[in-house]
């Protein structure tokens, strides 16, 4: 076999592979020898068919099999001998001339074919100990504790109906209504037995305000305007009139923060409940601390590694991202214009996101390979169990789905592998620790200034 490089520009490779006719002939003889004892031809006993007759009857089809196997074997060897790492399976270009192929099949010519493929880039990893990373940590403050406990009682509020009560902020009402725009009822604008809690913002602007002070049995016409960015485009920005009939008004009853309340939540007393809440808040802190540190690490990895990206990987990732974005916008009945940008600008923005993902994916993979980081069977089993728990009563179907879909298993494995690589790098980077408040810790990324 002879391999020549016909093109090597950037990450693209084009090779020409020549398999001598003599080599193909030896492969053909070996193939005939392998099948001669299994061939059955009328007039001959099994295993007694003359080789010359086998060649006459099956020679062409056997030679085609030999050529296919030769291409698979030699193309694979051409890549491994050059220590190349193809992004995808190489594209094989066989001779287009039928007469030339026929000569090869007849054993009168060498097999020459082309290979085109894109390779993964080679790059040096930075010394991770030089990365300047910071781990933000926050203590669980008393104020946060009190807010969390108050939130628990808020979620346990009950409502008591009062016949003559006039609705005020915090009350709950039950009502029937019919909404109209330009005198015509619109889809989704009519309902019976709907409840509303004043102050929770569950309805469009103007609706709650129009019902304050109402009593059971009252009928009102409420004017309310749909927001300009409302999910249903045909209603966005339009003003509607609602014929509302209030059937019940109820006053809120908030439970006292005491041992009896703690018992309803499975705690022995308030001391135990406070301990449970503090543990939960600390877990929230830990998750956010890790998320911020991981984000900072990924930013650092991206900024410290500059190398060419395989166009096919970027394009594939971009198409995945773009499909998700456009499908979401379609479901929400939004357009790029309504979001204040052009499609061209949006494509450029999401292509950068795709490039970042590909670059970080290659870096994460390289770190994992060099340090032999593996996802264990126990870790995969745990991830699969967690996934199955999301679908109560359908666990069997979840397990069967992953058994039959290697790509789904790969998607389940990827975040586990990424987190293990991140932990490995963080350990080498040895980030400094900085005490912050809870508000600072939970400040949205990008708002640190």
Image: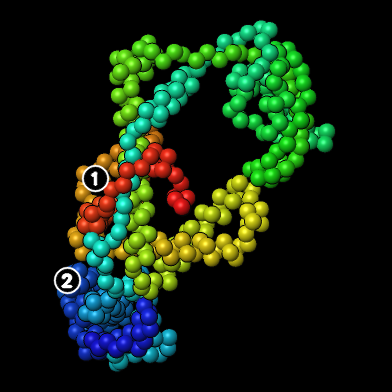
Q: Is residue 431 left or right of residue 443?
A: left
Instruction: In the displayed orientation, state which residue is furthest to the bottom.
Output: 108
Q: Is residue 262 left or right of residue 250?
A: left
In the image, what residue occupies the spot 37% across and 59% down?
299
Asked which secondary structure carries label 2, the reply is loop
- Does residue 431 appear anywhere in the picture? yes
Residue 311, percent from left and from top: 43, 72
Residue 424, percent from left and from top: 23, 55
2 or 1: tag closer to the N-terminus: 2
In the image, what residue occupies the spot 21% across and 64% down?
370
In the image, what residue occupies the spot 31% across and 14% down?
269
* Number of residues whose C-alpha sits closer than 10 Å to that of mark 2, classed few (under 14), some (14–19) or many (20 or more): few
Which mark is drawn over residue 379?
A: 1
Mark 2 or 1: the one toward you: 1
Which mark is drawn over residue 37?
A: 2
Q: Quadrant of residue 185?
A: top right
Q: Quadrant of residue 344?
A: bottom right
Instruction: In the displayed orientation, state which residue is furthest to the right.
Output: 183
Quadrant showing the N terminus:
bottom left
Residue 161, percent from left and from top: 60, 10
Q: Are marks 2 and 1 in contact (CB under 8 Å)?
A: no
Q: Is residue 15 above or below residue 309?
A: below
Q: Is residue 366 above or below residue 53?
A: above
Q: Quadrant of residue 393?
A: top left
Instruction: In the displayed orientation, state which residue is furthest to the top.
Output: 163
Asked which secondary structure carries label 1, the reply is helix
Residue 335, percent from left and from top: 64, 54
In the image, what residue occupies the spot 66% across and 42% down?
230
- Does residue 53 appear anywhere in the picture? no
């Amino acid at each position: 076999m002879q391999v020549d490089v016909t093109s090597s520009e950037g990450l693209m490779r084009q090779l020409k592979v020549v398999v001598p006719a003599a080599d193909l002939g030896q492969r053909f003889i070996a193939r005939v020898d392998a099948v001669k004892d299994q061939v059955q031809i009328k007039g001959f006993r099994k295993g007694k068919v003359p080789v010359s007759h086998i060649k006459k009857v099956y020679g062409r089809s056997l030679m085609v099999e030999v050529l296919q196997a030769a291409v698979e074997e030699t193309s694979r060897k051409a890549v491994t001998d050059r220590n190349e790492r193809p992004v995808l399976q190489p594209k094989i270009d066989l001779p287009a001339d039928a007469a030339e192929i026929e000569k090869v099949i007849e054993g009168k010519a060498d097999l020459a074919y082309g290979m085109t493929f894109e390779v993964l880039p080679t790059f040096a990893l930075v010394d991770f100990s030089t990365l300047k990373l910071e781990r933000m940590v926050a203590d669980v403050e008393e104020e946060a504790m009190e807010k969390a406990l108050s939130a628990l009682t808020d979620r346990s509020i009950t409502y008591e109906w009062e016949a003559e009560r006039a609705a005020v902020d915090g009350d709950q009402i039950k009502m029937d209504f019919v909404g109209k725009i330009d005198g015509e009822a619109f889809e989704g604008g009519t309902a019976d037995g709907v409840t509303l809690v004043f102050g929770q913002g569950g309805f469009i602007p103007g609706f709650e305000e129009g019902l304050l002070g109402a009593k059971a049995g009252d009928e009102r016409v409420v004017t309310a305007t749909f927001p300009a960015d409302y999910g249903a485009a045909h209603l966005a920005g339009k003003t509607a009139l609602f014929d509302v009939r209030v059937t019940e008004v109820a006053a809120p009853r908030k439970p006292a923060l005491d041992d009896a309340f703690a018992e309803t939540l499975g705690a022995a007393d308030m001391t135990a409940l406070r301990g449970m809440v503090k543990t939960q808040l600390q877990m929230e802190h830990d998750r956010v601390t890790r998320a911020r540190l991981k984000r900072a690490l990924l930013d650092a990895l991206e900024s410290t590694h500059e190398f060419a990206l395989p166009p096919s990987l970027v394009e594939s990732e971009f198409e995945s991202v773009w499909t998700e974005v456009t499908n979401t916008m379609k479901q929400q009945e939004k357009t790029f214009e309504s979001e204040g940008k052009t499609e061209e600008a949006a494509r450029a923005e999401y292509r950068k996101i795709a490039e970042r993902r590909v670059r970080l994916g290659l870096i994460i993979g390289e770190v994992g390979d060099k340090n032999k980081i593996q996802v264990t069977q126990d870790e995969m089993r745990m991830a699969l169990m967690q996934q199955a728990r999301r679908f109560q009563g359908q666990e069997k179907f979840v397990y069967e789905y992953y058994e039959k879909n290697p790509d789904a298993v790969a998607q389940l494995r990827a975040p586990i592998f990424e987190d293990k690589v991140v932990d490995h790098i963080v350990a080498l980077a040895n980030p400094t620790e900085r005490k912050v408040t809870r508000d600072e810790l939970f400040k949205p990324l990008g708002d640190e200034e």
